[in-house]
Image (tube, grey):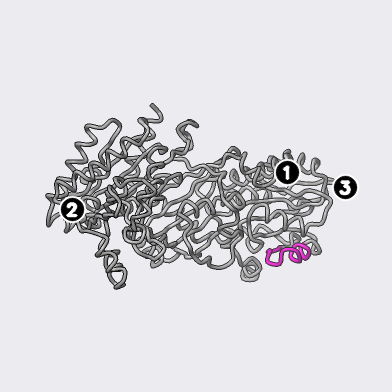
Amino acid sequence: MAHALSASIPNQVKLVVWDLDETLWNGTLSEEGISTVEAHLQMVRDLVDRGIMCSICSKNDFEDAKAALVDLDIWDYFVFPHIAWSPKGQAIKAMIAAMGLRDENVLFLDDNHLNLEEAQFFNPNVMVFDANQDILPLMDLPTLAGKDDKSHSRLKQYKVMEEKQVEQAETGLSNIDFLRQSDIRVKVITDVEDQMDRVYEILNRTNQLNYTKKRANTPAEKAQLQTLLNTAGVHAGLIEVQDRYGDYGVVGFFCVSAKYSGNVVHHLAFSCRTLNMGVEQWVWQFLNEPDFRTVGGVANPIDAHENVDWIQDVKDFDAPETARQQQHLCLVGGCDLLQVSFYCGTDRDEFVNKPDDNGMLVRFDDVGFFLNQRDPVLNRLFTQKNFIGYGSDDMVALDESLASSDLILLSMYFSFANDLLFQYRGKEPGSEFLGSVPPRRFQQLMRDQKTAMRFAKSMQHRPYDIHDRLDLTHRCFQVADVLRRADAPIFIIGTTVRHGPQAERNPKPRIAFNDMCRKFCAETHNAHFIDIDTLLTPAEFTDSDHYSRTGYFKIADFVNSHTMMKIAA
């Protein structure tokens, strides 16, 4: 018997749909009346304590049935009840869709065999059980074991979903209009190590909005995930969501590798609690819309909407509204900023290492990017787009970003440390431009003989000494200071002088760079030096110029904390 019962309920149960008459209770409400089956009421309570939701699909008068359930003190344990004189199969289908579930995780209890068959006709994978039998042994099945939720967090979340759908139906708003007035807020939790149980639960229990479907069930799979999280350049986050209706809790997880050529997606998975809210697409946009292949079927394509602009990124749900407003950031620098930007908010201009249309590296931590003339006539003479990688439009965009941003973050060590600085001298007076060519780009340019000849004729190598290079980078900081608003802080990231082989071999240039940055910040209003050696632990350095995921998070947290204190003040 136990084996047959288990075989009839093979899948994990997330929702139990109850008939009322002769199932939850004995008798018929609209005829001879009912008698309570206390064991069934306790079964409902125990299911909810396990995080398994309960709903109702019953042919009855709604108000009469609700009154009876209120008298039994059980009404509030049910979500999305359908109590009406209408067919049950399509009603259950609509209920499952409204809750964002799959029919294969739904169990329907009814004493009428025709109702059970109708439910399976419209929902082919739904599990059914004849309530003429004893239903109490179902609680001993592993597929109804659930997970401890005596706080009823899942029940509260589904109540929020239910309230939202009722209000949307009453207002008659379109889905997008309704979302815009819902005040949806997302918090990205990057300290995932303290919540690994929730990470595993999301990866292992989600399907409809799990775009990668990589699990972490076995010890080997969990160890593989931990190794991935400890890899340099890998970023991960849990997604917590609230709106004006309530708190959905932690509903999603992402894990990506950040590279200058684009982000590589390892994990992207979400609970169905936020289905049709656009949260999964917002996270994809937050990750700079990486190109990846969706594994298996999903309820929504990742780009279901043209643009998700109704969700706000927040650092703290409880902060005052003024403190939660998204700040506009300007980030200029090397690959370290590509990592830091994950934790600094979505409203940002990134002038960070990236490939150009030919796949060659472009670096924006270049003195010429700040100091070259913005004269469009002279810029047309300069072949910088071909040789350097950025053009006049990029330089103008930098100026506009520096002038409009609420915060500026600069990581400019490469602008000082590199010795591949070239000068272009045009035919017109004053048409002189500086530009850095990183080694990888220089090698690619030299592979084509015609390009190499043009480069040799146009570009003159400038072997500046350490003092000249420090002066050029200092002038870049001055440009940023002149263009920014007085209330917009500048943060300048230093470099290590103690960790990694590059620093250990030759610390003197790094010391000189840090000293120049400190001096600039000390003499400049609202400018802040980020001392890497003080902020990070030795374990958070992967080499002299790159840090672990927690290291990049600490840099961003330093910036975010300072900014939030300023807003609060």
**Magenta stretch bounds:** 116-128
Disc tally is 3
Magenta run includes residue 126: yes
Which of the marked residues, 3 or 1, is nearer the chain's N terminus?
Answer: 3
Q: Which mark is residue 169?
A: 1
Q: Nearer the viewer, residue 329 or 385?
A: 385
Residue at point 27%, 40% (across, down): 477
Left or right side of 481 for 163: right
Residue at point 41%, 54% (across, down): 236
Q: Secondary structure at mark 3?
A: loop
Q: Position of residue 118 (x, y in %)?
A: 78, 63
Which of the marked residues, 2 or 3, is nearer the chain's N terminus?
Answer: 3
Left or right side of 109 for 182: left
Residue 194 in sight in this render: no
Q: Nearer the viewer, residue 265 or 21?
A: 265
Q: CA distance from mark 3 to mark 1?
A: 32 Å
Note whether 554 is above or below 462 in the view shown.
above
- Callout 1 amino acid: Ala
- Callout 3 amino acid: Glu
Residue at far front of view = 428
Magenta run includes residue 115: no
Nearer mark to the viewer, of 3 and 1: 1
- Callout 2 amino acid: His
Q: Which residue is mark 3?
A: 31
Q: Which residue is mark 2?
A: 499
Q: CA distance from mark 2 to mark 1?
A: 60 Å
Mark 3 nearby-residue class (10 Å; few <14, some 14–19, many ≥20)? few
Residue 479 in sight in this render: yes
